[in-house]
Amino acid sequence: MQKRHLDPQRYFNEQAASTQKYVLPFIESNKKIDNALNILEIGCGEAGNLKPFLDLGCNCTGVDLSISKIEKGKTYYAAHPKVKNLRLISEDIYKTKDFHSQFDVVIIRDVIEHIHDQDKFLRLLKDLLTPTALVFIAFPPWQSPFGGHQQVCDNKLLSLLPYFHLLPIPLYKAVLKSFGESESKIEGLLEIKETGISLERFEALALKNEYPVLLKTLYLINPNYEVKFGLKPRLLNKILSKIPYFRNYFCTCGYYLLGRS
């Protein structure tokens, strides 16, 4: 496991910096972000992605299942001059009340690949949106080099080893166990193997649930890698990006901006 995964404050700062530089402009290509907007992040963790929006005076809401992450987020924002515009809620998004037709922008960043029944999730999401809302979704395709999130492995070699998450489940589990990963870590990684999503499946679900794709960018080098590893983002080759299925093995992140039909 990399040191950054053990430092929530560092992770918070990385999220805020990457969102400021890449996510905010991506959304603003279709909607001006100002203090009149209501922003929701689902699976927000400590809510670092919300900081650039809060800085602009937006009304921001973050929802996450983890009580500890939400509490850390509240601590990080305690001194923010616009903290009164922020709500951080530890709750299951399916059980959250009073969100009907409330949000102008919804952020789902590095989250959808962890969700069971993504079709159900996208159906639920529509009920939270205003008529002109936008949905920003970013995720690594399952088949990408680190689509299994193996970077969280405690074993250093496994945390740097690409593609081995694509092994059949029995072999994948055996490798994790033989390198000393804990039962809880193995269980979490196997769950990601179950919920991982490809670009094609995501686009098919967006079409099925009537979310028009307003903007799409596929990256060879994820924008997150700039603040994490000092690597400049690079787009996936235009020809490669148009080859279904094969492109998943080279795309480290897909940025999507969805509208509401």
Image: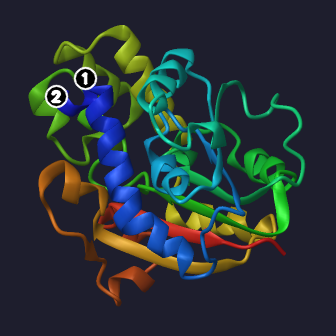
Image quarter in which the N terminus is found: top left
Front residue of this view, candidates 41 and 197? 41
Classify 90 as above or below 42: above
Residue assigned mark 1: 6
Residue 19, given in percent of the width and then of the height, sits at: 41, 58
User: Could you give the CA–CA distance between mark 2 and mark 1, rounded to whole angstroms?
Assistant: 5 Å
**Left-right relation of 132 to 11:** right
Residue assigned mark 2: 3
Front residue of this view, candidates 227 and 73? 73
The disc placed on residue 30 is none
Rendered image quadrant of residue 224: bottom left
Three-letter amino acid code at the position of disc 1: Leu
Binning the other alpha carbons within 10 Å of mark 1 as few (below 14), some (14 to 19) or many (20 upward) gives: few
Element type where label 1 sits in the image = helix
Is residue 204 in view? yes
Three-letter amino acid code at the position of disc 2: Lys
Classify 34 as above or below 193: below
Residue 221, given in percent of the width and then of the height, sits at: 25, 66
Residue 234, given in percent of the width and then of the height, sits at: 24, 75
Residue found at x 32% / y 27%: 8
- CB under 8 Å between discs 2 and 1: yes
Q: Residue furthest front?
A: 81
Residue found at x 81% / y 31%: 96
Binning the other alpha carbons within 10 Å of mark 2 as few (below 14), some (14 to 19) or many (20 upward) gives: few
**Left-right relation of 232 to 89:** left
